[in-house]
Image: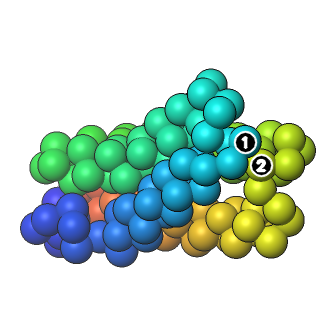
């Protein structure tokens, strides 16, 4: 099993938590706040990143952990897609888009690295 005793110790989770706050902040004012569908969807997608990292760690097996990390990666991609629409609709500017997209890239890389680590650990155990 991965060496994390608590999901709060996982840096990707910490960064996803920070991202959630930023997503909530930008969705809470201006025209973005009135687009209930996109606002709610991007919030749910970003929440899913941290939630799936935490749930995977809580499952207590490397295989389950890796599975939930894969779901978190899907939520990273979904959140990125929603950012494009927010940009296209003028809810966020290019600077905000680039900043959030970069943070999502970082979270995605960290999550993928953890998946790789877990898969290698699983292979070692199976041999």
Callout 1: few (<14), some (14-19), or many (20+) C-alpha neighbours within 10 Å? some
Identified at 14% across, 65% down, the residue is 6
Identified at 72% across, 42% down, the residue is 31
Q: Earlier in the sequence, mark 2 or mark 1?
A: 1
Residue 102 in percent (x, y) is at: 68, 70
Q: Nearer the viewer, residue 58 or 2?
A: 58
Q: How is the image coloured?
A: rainbow
Q: Please name the residue that numbered disc 1 is placed on.
A: 31
State the count of labels: 2
Identified at 42% across, 42% down, the residue is 48
Q: Please name the residue that numbered disc 2 is placed on.
A: 91
Q: Is residue 54 above or below residue 113?
A: above
Given the current orientation, which residue lies at the most extreme top position? 37
- Which of the image's four quarters has the N terminus? bottom left
Whether residue 58 appears in this view of the structure is yes
How far apart, in angstroms, are the residues tagged by discs 2 and 1? 6 Å
Residue 115 in percent (x, y) is at: 43, 58
Determine whether the residue tagged by mark 2 lies in a helix, strand or loop. loop
From the viewer's perspective, tell me whether residue 87 is left or right of residue 16.
right
Whether residue 109 appears in this view of the structure is no
Q: Nearer the viewer, residue 88 or 64?
A: 88
Residue 54 in percent (x, y) is at: 26, 52
Q: Nearer the viewer, residue 1 or 73?
A: 73
Identified at 49% across, 52% down, the residue is 24
Determine whether the residue tagged by mark 1 lies in a helix, strand or loop. helix
Q: Nearer the viewer, residue 103 or 125?
A: 103
Callout 2: few (<14), some (14-19), or many (20+) C-alpha neighbours within 10 Å? some
Q: Are marks 2 and 1 in contact (CB under 8 Å)?
A: yes
Q: Is residue 28 above or below residue 107?
A: above
């Amino acid at each position: 099993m991965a060496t994390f005793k608590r999901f709060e110790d996982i840096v990707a989770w910490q960064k996803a938590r920070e991202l959630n706050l930023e997503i909530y902040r930008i969705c809470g004012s201006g025209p973005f706040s009135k687009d209930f569908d996109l606002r709610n969807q991007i919030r749910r997608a970003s929440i899913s990143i941290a939630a799936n990292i935490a749930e995977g760690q809580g499952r207590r097996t490397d295989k389950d952990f890796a599975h939930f990390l894969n779901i978190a990666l899907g939520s990273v991609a979904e959140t990125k897609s929603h950012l494009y629409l927010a940009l296209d609709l003028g809810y966020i500017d290019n600077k905000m888009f680039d900043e959030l997209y970069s943070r999502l890239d970082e979270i995605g890389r960290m999550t993928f690295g953890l998946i790789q680590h877990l898969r290698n650990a699983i292979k070692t155990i199976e041999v």
